[in-house]
Amino acid sequence: MRGAKRRSNLDVQRLLRPDFIGARNDNIKTFTSFELVYLDSKSKATIVEIKMIRDALEASVIEGEDRLDAMVEQVYASDLMSDVLAFGRPNSILLTGLATQQAVISAHMAEFKGVVFIRGKKPKDGSEKFARDNHLVLLSTELDMYDACLRIDSAKRRMYPETKTSSVGQKTEEMLLSHEFSIQGNDFTNAGMVSTEVKSILKKIGLDPKLIRRVAISTYEGEMNVVMHAQRAKVNLWVTPKLIEVTIEDEGKGIPDVELAMQEGFTTATEEMRAMGFGSGMGLPNIKKNSDELEIKSEVGKGTILQMRFFI
Amino acid sequence: MTTQDLIEKIGLKPLSKFEHRKVNGVFVSDMLSDVMASAKSGNLWLTVQTHKSIVPAANLVDVSAILITGGKEVPQETVDLASKYSIAILSTELPTFELVGKLYGLGLGSK
């Protein structure tokens, strides 16, 4: 799909140049679309999950409960479907009072991710089925057009404050997305599935493939350590415009000597595990090599917490 | 050199469903952390490990294909998981040493 291609910095610059936005406005009397992009000091465009829009509008989900983590870059507010087709961009969400299948089809043609119906409207025709078949999210909010736009805009401002002094530690201000996973100890059948999921999520945002690879490898090694040496673990993935953080907190036997564990070649893997190709003693060293910051806290008999940070 | 070329030139057997891609070099190892540490994107990974965990490892390191040598049988579970993520699993009766000789002869290095 056209919109799914990762934007190069050149594309981003073109999107955000004032004359580019101005040129589009010359063709229409009123400014009916606004960007959910945030310019940080490096001029990178950012995007939000549909979940954030649902929460901001207190909207009900008509269709697509399982697709609320889809990312959108723009909200297009309009009741004129030919405008949507002419000016809408891929990976947007449509905000409209036209509660018919026509709106849903137009959004689909323009490669939007979903439609929000205002004033509590819900389409009565085959819209739901069409949305389901074409993987679109349908939401309905009680708010009218003006209030809905305001709510989304202020929610966006809370997430990306105009002042660029946000520090790396303020996760709640800048959070782009946050996911939680769990790993079962000794479950070699599913070992690696969490890191695979993390990779898919980061790929969807369109981050640099080399960065994704470093995060994926680190998460994988952390995941394998849980499977091999712990009972269970909780994994948290946080992404902000500046930083990716992966934390793995496990319940297990813990690490008696962290410095020793960090040595290449040192392993406490069993013969069985080694027969499967694990336990070469490269796990923690691999994580150290691939991450920008690594913190290990461990208590023997209780468990281990691994905090890995990757700067974007 | 693509995975398609190798399959034809050496006579490898594709087991999973995948898309052909360019092969950059060869990596030989049966230790997964080794692969995570040193295999490069696009490498052809030679191994005798056939359990499911080779699939996420291959996926995360982005190898062009996993080649199981020595005629080792690959469980359907592993093949199905590989097909799900479009990871190529190829199979050969030849032992690793001979395979490496053939690949080297075709001009593939370790990069």
Image: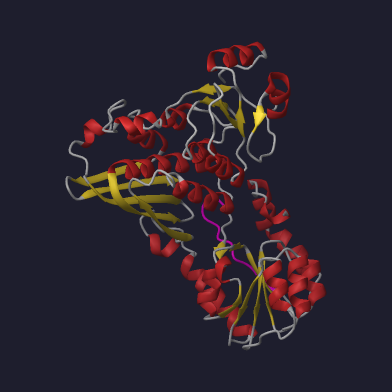
Q: Position of residue A13 (x, y in %)?
A: 65, 51
Residue at point 64%, 84% (across, down): A118
Q: Position of residue A7 (x, y in %)?
A: 65, 50
A129 left or right, relative to A56: right
Residue at point 40%, 30% (across, down): A277
Q: Position of residue A181 (x, y in %)?
A: 41, 56
Q: State whether residue A207 is above or below residue A136.
A: above
Q: Magenta stretch: residue A214 in it? A: no
Q: Is residue A148 visible?
A: yes
Q: Position of residue A59 (x, y in %)?
A: 55, 80
Give the camera-side residue of B50 and B31.
B50
Q: Quadrant of residue B2?
A: top right
Give the camera-side residue of A302 and A155.
A302
Residues rendered magenta in the picture: A33-44
Q: Is residue A161 visible?
A: no
Give the camera-side residue of B61 and B79.
B79
Q: State whether residue B105 is above or below residue A195.
A: above
The N terminus of chain A: image quadrant: bottom right
Q: Predominant secondary structure in magenta? A: loop
Q: Is the image coloured rainbow, by chain, by secondary structure, or in one colour?
A: secondary structure
A108 left or right, relative to A275: right
